[in-house]
Image: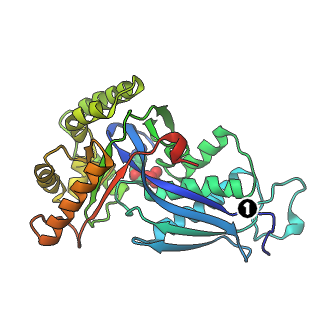
Amino acid sequence: MRDPDLVPVVRLAPAKLNLTLAVIARRDDGYHELHSVMATLALADRLSLAPSATRADTLHVTGADTGPAESDLVLRGIAEARRAAGAADPGDDPSSFAPGRPSAPALAARLEKRIPVAAGLAGGSSDAAAAMDGALEAWAIDLDVDARRAAALRLGSDVPFFLVGGFAAVAGHGDRVTPLPSPRGEPGVLLVTPAIAVSTGAVFAALDDGARQPDPGATRVSSVHLAQELGQGLDTHGLLVRAGVLAQANDLVLGAEVVAPGLRAFRRVLARRLGRPVGQSGSGPTCWALYASLDEATAAAAGLGRDLEAGTIEAPGDGRPFVAATTFTTREGGQP
Ligand code: C5P
């Protein structure tokens, strides 16, 4: 059953950070119109795809934080790639294949999880994007950009962003992705993810139930402004100067606080301890702080780790938070 012509493919599936996230309006289909400045991070899952010994796609997950959602998204990414390419299901009878239909044999996927799940870092969406794109490469099937984008959107609102990567302004409900230049220099990012799984759907639902920011328009202004400034060549220093405004520019913060009480207080404690603004990525619970370099973020992560160990800082959730220092990835280097 193993297809000797298939090329094994390895992909890094990066986490994303929301530097801003404005919720503009609720749409008739229940989704929300957004404006967000997002960026891929060096923190990444690792996905490999190889020929499968069976007639069905398979997945083996290893790493810190495994769960059914991730398995679902990798296998869905492969299935969506097959569907978008118009290829037959490898489980079907080959004699029923129409002539000229692309061949998309079954794949054995291995996923090494490093990104915490349900954390506001879109690890599952990134895995789905990597699976879709990697499967097409393994089968040597070329799909045009529009077909790729449409297939990505069927997998989830955050997925189209990962086809672009780097810094980008994301609008609509995730379908409009405008690439932006990365800030000059190499800012460091500290991530602190309390051990609470937060469902994005639940946070949006809390928002619809009334947990709105006092002035939703203000977040949109900050978000659009940041996109413009990055477009004009903002550097690391400029980004750090704006961190206070950015840390306030997430309309999902109040919804996340309803779903995971204690998050807001924890962010305040962190901001005091780190001596700098602390924001929330996506629907949370991941908290972020920006540094002038990876070295500075690494030192801050070590200090915070000691405080958490000693119990001088307590985090909400079931167990110790995930703490990591990382950097942003550029479009060229980030997505192979
Ligand atoms: O698209 P995805 O599956 O990632 O979204 C998860 C949930 O988040 C959706 O079911 C929806 O409730 C909510 N959502 C939304 N508006 C968006 C993105 C997500 O309401 N733009």
Residue 115, quarter of the rendered image? bottom left
The residue singled out by tag 1 in the image is: 7
Q: Nearer the viewer, residue 282 or 296?
A: 296
Question: Could one spot residue 115 in this view of the protein?
Answer: yes
- Left or right: residue 39 versus residue 283 is right
Q: Residue at x 77, y 56 (%)?
A: 87
Q: Position of residue 267 (x, y in %)?
A: 17, 52
Give neighbour class at mark 1: few <14, some 14-19, many 20+ (Cα, 10 Å): some
Q: Please tell me whether residue 217 is drawn above or below residue 156 in the rendered image.
A: above
Q: Residue at x 32, y 51 (%)?
A: 283
Query: Helix or strand or loop: what does disc 1 sit on?
Result: loop
Q: Please tell me whether residue 174 is drawn above or below residue 83 in the rendered image.
A: above
Q: Position of residue 246 (x, y in %)?
A: 25, 37
The residue lying furthest to the front in this view is 295
Query: Which quadrant, please, contains the N terminus?
Result: bottom right
Q: Nearer the viewer, residue 64 or 89?
A: 64
Q: Residue at x 21, y 65 (%)?
A: 305
Q: Please tell me whether residue 104 is drawn above or below residue 311 in the rendered image.
A: above
Q: Nearer the viewer, residue 1 or 308?
A: 308
Q: Nearer the viewer, residue 167 or 187?
A: 187
Amino acid under disc 1: Val
Q: Position of residue 281 (x, y in %)?
A: 31, 49
Q: Position of residue 303 (x, y in %)?
A: 18, 60
**Total numbered badges shown on the rendered structure:** 1
